Image (spheres, rainbow, N blue to C red):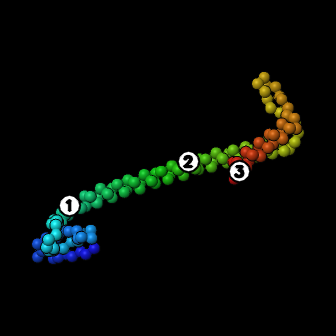
Amino acid sequence: MLVLLADPAGAEGVYKWVDAQGRTHFGSTPPPGQKTERLNSQTATPEAAPAQGNRSWQEQLDLSNQRRQQAREKEQASAKADQENQQRCIAARSALDSLERGGARYRVNEQGERDYLDDSQRQAARDAASQRVATYCR
Protein backbone atom coordinates (compact mmCIF):
# COMPACT_ATOMS: atom_id res chain seq x y z
CA MET A 1 0.00 0.00 0.00
CA LEU A 2 1.40 3.36 -1.00
CA VAL A 3 0.64 6.23 1.34
CA LEU A 4 1.62 9.78 0.52
CA LEU A 5 1.37 12.48 3.13
CA ALA A 6 1.43 16.12 2.18
CA ASP A 7 1.95 19.28 4.16
CA PRO A 8 -1.56 20.26 5.35
CA ALA A 9 -0.89 23.98 4.88
CA GLY A 10 -0.15 23.67 1.17
CA ALA A 11 -2.23 20.61 0.34
CA GLU A 12 -5.33 20.77 -1.76
CA GLY A 13 -6.66 17.63 -0.11
CA VAL A 14 -6.11 13.91 0.18
CA TYR A 15 -7.56 11.53 -2.38
CA LYS A 16 -8.33 7.84 -2.13
CA TRP A 17 -8.62 5.44 -5.08
CA VAL A 18 -8.50 1.73 -5.89
CA ASP A 19 -6.23 0.53 -8.70
CA ALA A 20 -6.93 -2.24 -11.23
CA GLN A 21 -5.45 -4.87 -8.85
CA GLY A 22 -7.86 -3.85 -6.08
CA ARG A 23 -5.27 -2.06 -3.95
CA THR A 24 -6.30 1.12 -2.14
CA HIS A 25 -4.05 4.16 -2.58
CA PHE A 26 -3.94 7.61 -1.01
CA GLY A 27 -2.35 10.71 -2.45
CA SER A 28 -2.43 14.50 -2.69
CA THR A 29 -3.14 14.46 -6.43
CA PRO A 30 -5.66 12.11 -8.02
CA PRO A 31 -4.45 9.94 -10.91
CA PRO A 32 -5.96 10.80 -14.27
CA GLY A 33 -8.85 8.61 -15.37
CA GLN A 34 -9.39 7.02 -11.94
CA LYS A 35 -12.51 7.27 -9.84
CA THR A 36 -11.34 9.01 -6.66
CA GLU A 37 -12.78 10.03 -3.34
CA ARG A 38 -11.67 13.22 -1.66
CA LEU A 39 -11.11 12.72 2.06
CA ASN A 40 -11.74 15.35 4.68
CA SER A 41 -8.37 16.28 6.11
CA GLN A 42 -9.68 18.23 9.09
CA THR A 43 -8.57 16.95 12.45
CA ALA A 44 -10.93 16.27 15.31
CA THR A 45 -11.36 18.91 17.94
CA PRO A 46 -9.32 18.30 21.09
CA GLU A 47 -12.50 18.03 23.19
CA ALA A 48 -13.92 15.16 21.10
CA ALA A 49 -10.97 12.79 21.44
CA PRO A 50 -10.66 12.83 25.26
CA ALA A 51 -14.40 12.32 25.73
CA GLN A 52 -14.26 9.09 23.73
CA GLY A 53 -11.07 8.09 25.53
CA ASN A 54 -12.61 8.75 28.95
CA ARG A 55 -15.66 6.70 28.13
CA SER A 56 -13.49 3.84 26.94
CA TRP A 57 -11.28 4.18 30.01
CA GLN A 58 -14.33 4.12 32.30
CA GLU A 59 -15.69 1.02 30.56
CA GLN A 60 -12.31 -0.68 30.96
CA LEU A 61 -12.21 0.26 34.64
CA ASP A 62 -15.73 -1.10 35.19
CA LEU A 63 -14.84 -4.32 33.38
CA SER A 64 -11.66 -4.69 35.42
CA ASN A 65 -13.55 -4.14 38.68
CA GLN A 66 -16.18 -6.67 37.61
CA ARG A 67 -13.51 -9.28 36.84
CA ARG A 68 -11.82 -8.68 40.20
CA GLN A 69 -15.16 -9.08 42.00
CA GLN A 70 -15.83 -12.34 40.14
CA ALA A 71 -12.35 -13.61 41.05
CA ARG A 72 -12.93 -12.72 44.73
CA GLU A 73 -16.29 -14.53 44.72
CA LYS A 74 -14.74 -17.58 43.07
CA GLU A 75 -11.91 -17.59 45.62
CA GLN A 76 -14.38 -17.30 48.52
CA ALA A 77 -16.48 -20.16 47.14
CA SER A 78 -13.34 -22.27 46.75
CA ALA A 79 -12.23 -21.50 50.32
CA LYS A 80 -15.70 -22.41 51.64
CA ALA A 81 -15.66 -25.70 49.69
CA ASP A 82 -12.17 -26.47 51.03
CA GLN A 83 -13.33 -25.83 54.60
CA GLU A 84 -16.40 -28.06 54.13
CA ASN A 85 -14.21 -30.83 52.69
CA GLN A 86 -11.85 -30.51 55.65
CA GLN A 87 -14.76 -30.97 58.07
CA ARG A 88 -16.02 -33.97 56.07
CA CYS A 89 -12.49 -35.40 56.09
CA ILE A 90 -12.29 -35.15 59.89
CA ALA A 91 -15.68 -36.85 60.26
CA ALA A 92 -14.78 -39.60 57.76
CA ARG A 93 -11.45 -40.34 59.47
CA SER A 94 -13.16 -40.46 62.86
CA ALA A 95 -15.76 -42.92 61.55
CA LEU A 96 -13.09 -45.08 59.91
CA ASP A 97 -10.96 -45.10 63.07
CA SER A 98 -13.98 -46.13 65.12
CA LEU A 99 -14.82 -48.98 62.75
CA GLU A 100 -11.23 -50.22 62.61
CA ARG A 101 -10.83 -50.39 66.39
CA GLY A 102 -13.11 -53.36 66.44
CA GLY A 103 -15.71 -54.23 69.00
CA ALA A 104 -19.45 -54.35 68.59
CA ARG A 105 -20.93 -51.62 66.39
CA TYR A 106 -24.59 -50.74 66.11
CA ARG A 107 -27.06 -48.38 64.55
CA VAL A 108 -30.16 -47.00 66.23
CA ASN A 109 -33.36 -47.90 64.38
CA GLU A 110 -36.66 -45.96 64.14
CA GLN A 111 -37.90 -47.43 67.43
CA GLY A 112 -34.77 -46.26 69.22
CA GLU A 113 -33.40 -49.78 69.55
CA ARG A 114 -29.84 -50.82 68.76
CA ASP A 115 -29.28 -52.96 65.67
CA TYR A 116 -25.82 -54.51 65.93
CA LEU A 117 -23.78 -54.84 62.75
CA ASP A 118 -22.57 -58.24 61.65
CA ASP A 119 -19.13 -58.71 60.08
CA SER A 120 -20.27 -58.08 56.49
CA GLN A 121 -22.17 -54.93 57.49
CA ARG A 122 -19.18 -53.69 59.47
CA GLN A 123 -16.89 -54.34 56.46
CA ALA A 124 -19.32 -52.47 54.16
CA ALA A 125 -19.37 -49.53 56.61
CA ARG A 126 -15.56 -49.62 56.78
CA ASP A 127 -15.33 -49.60 52.96
CA ALA A 128 -17.78 -46.67 52.76
CA ALA A 129 -15.80 -44.74 55.38
CA SER A 130 -12.55 -45.45 53.49
CA GLN A 131 -14.16 -44.14 50.32
CA ARG A 132 -15.25 -40.93 52.12
CA VAL A 133 -11.70 -40.48 53.46
CA ALA A 134 -10.31 -40.88 49.92
CA THR A 135 -12.84 -38.38 48.58
CA TYR A 136 -12.56 -35.63 51.21
CA CYS A 137 -8.98 -36.01 52.51
CA ARG A 138 -6.89 -35.06 49.48
Quarter of the image where one finds residue 59: bottom left
Question: 32 or 126, which lies in front?
Answer: 32
Horizontal side of 100 relative to 20 (left or right) equals: right
Q: Earlier in the sequence, mark 3 or mark 2?
A: 2
Q: Is residue 101 above or below residue 9?
A: above
Residue indicated by mark 2? 77
Kindly tell me whether residue 119 is visible in this rendering. Answer: yes
How many dots with numbers?
A: 3
Q: Which residue appears at 41% of the width and 56% of the height? A: 64
Q: Which residue is mark 1?
A: 47
Q: Secondary structure at mark 3?
A: loop
Q: Position of residue 108 (x, y in %)?
A: 79, 29
- The percent position of residue 6, horizontal first and vertical second, equals 17, 76
Q: Residues within 10 Å of mark 2 (few under 14, many from 20)?
A: few
Residue 42 seen: no
Pointer 3 residue: 137
Where residue 97 sits, quadrant-wise, is top right
Residue 47 against residue 129 in the figure, above or below: below
Q: CA distance from mark 3 to mark 2?
A: 18 Å
Q: What amino acid is at disc 3?
A: Cys
Asked whether disc 1 touches disc 2, contact meaning CB atoms under 8 Å apart, the reply is: no
On screen, residue 87 versus residue 29, left or right, reads: right
Of the numbered discs 1 and 2, the one sitting upstream in the chain is 1
Q: Nearer the viewer, residue 134 or 112?
A: 134
Is disc 2 placed on a helix, strand or loop? helix
> From the image, which quarter does the N terminus lie in?
bottom left
State the residue at coordinates (38%, 53%). Answer: 62
What is the C-alpha distance between the residues marked 1 and 2? 45 Å
Residue at x-position 29% and y-position 58%: 54
